[in-house]
Amino acid sequence: MTKIIIIGAAGRMGQTLIRCLDAGAVPGLELAGAVELWDSPMLGKPAGNSGVMVTSDLAAVAPKGDVLIDFSGHQGTAGNAPRIAAWGKGWVIGTTGIGPEGRAAIEAASKKIPIVWAPNMSLGVNLLFALLEQAGRALKGKGYDVEIIERHHRRKKDAPSGTALGLGQAVARGLEVDLDAVAVHGRHGVVKEDRSAAEIGFHAVRGGDIVGDHTVMFAADGEVIELSHRATSRDTFAVGALRAAAWLSGRAPGLYSMRDVLGV
C-alpha cells in the first residue's frame, strides 16, 4: 500500500483528492497525512474518513508517507523543494504559477527524488498536449494564426492558467519557436495589423464556478481548426494525480510528466 501525504489539503483540489482516496478511485493508495497553512480553519479536523487529522507541520507527517501530492501555493511548493528532496519522498506537483526560481528548485530536487510535475493531471488534457504538438508541426508555415482561450472559476489566482501555458508550449514545440518570445497575453487598444506568423495569443476568462475550459484555435484564411478540452469535475484531475502517485512510487530520481505516467 502506497501512503500519500496531501499538501494543500483544505483547498478545492485537496478536498477532491481526499474524497477520491476515500472512494478508492485508484487502488493501492491510502491517506497518511494532510497538510495546510497554519491559519487554516481545517487544522485539527479530520481529512475525510481516514482518521488522519489536518496539520500545518509537514515535517512531522512526511516520514509517514511514500509520495507527497502538492496542490498548494507556488511559494510553498518552491520553498519545500530542498527538504522534500532531503526526505527522499516521491513528489507529485500540480501547483501552477511557479516562476523561474521555483522551477530551478524543483529541477534541483529531481536529481535526488522522483517528481511528476504537470500543469494538468487529466488524461484528456495530456492527450491534447500530444495532439497540439503534432498540429503545430503539420501547420507550421501554412498561414495559421494560433489563439488559446481559457475559462476558469472566479477564484482562480493565476492567469493564464498553467494548463493554457502547457498547451502553448505544446504548440510552440511543434512550430519550433520559443513560447516566451512569441506569446501575447490579451489585447486592448489599437493592435498591429501585421501580426507575426509565430505569434501565440492567450486570453483568460474568469467567472462563476467553471472548472476548466481550454480551446486552441488555428485560424487561416478560409477555415478555423479548434481543439478543445472541457473539465466538468475536479475528479478527473484528482484521479490523474493519484495515478501519478501510484506510478511514481519506487521510481528512480528524475523529473517526469503526466505523458510519462499515462503513456501518451
Image (tube, grey):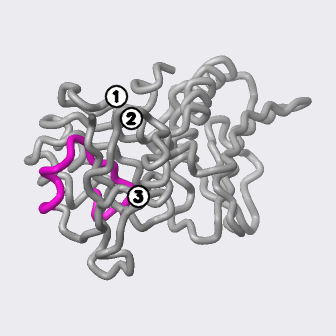
Q: Is residue 181 visible?
A: no
Above or below: residue 259 compared with residue 162 = above
Indicate the position of residue 109 as horizontal and vertical percent values: 17, 43
Q: Quadrant of residue 129?
A: top right
Mark number, residue 244: 2
Is mark 1 in CB contact (under 8 Å) with mark 3? no
Q: Residues within 10 Å of mark 2 (few under 14, many from 20)?
A: many
* Residue at x-position 38% and y-position 81%: 41
- CA separation in Å, label 3 and label 2: 22 Å
Could you tell me the amino acid type at mark 3? Answer: Asn
Residue 43 is at least partly visible in this image: yes
Across and down, in percent, residue 166 comes to 51, 41
Q: Quadrant of residue 62?
A: bottom left
Identify the residue under disc 1. Answer: 247
- Label 3 secondary element: loop
Of the two numbered discs 1 and 3 on the same chain, state the one appearing first in sequence.
3
Q: Position of residue 71 (x, y in %)?
A: 39, 56
Residue type indicated by callout 1: Trp
Assign the N terminus to one quadrant of the image: top left
Region in magenta: 59-77
Q: Which residue is labeled 3 in the image?
A: 49
Q: Rounded to the nearest whole Å, what is the CA distance between mark 1 and mark 3?
A: 24 Å
Q: Nearer the viewer, residue 261 or 170?
A: 261
Whether tag 2 and tag 1 are in contact, CB under 8 A, the answer is yes
- In the figure, residue 143 lies in which quadrant? top right
How far apart marks 2 and 1 lie (CA) works out to: 5 Å
Residue closest to the eye, 85 or 104:
85
**Which residue is at a point 64% across and 65% down the rendered structure image?**
153
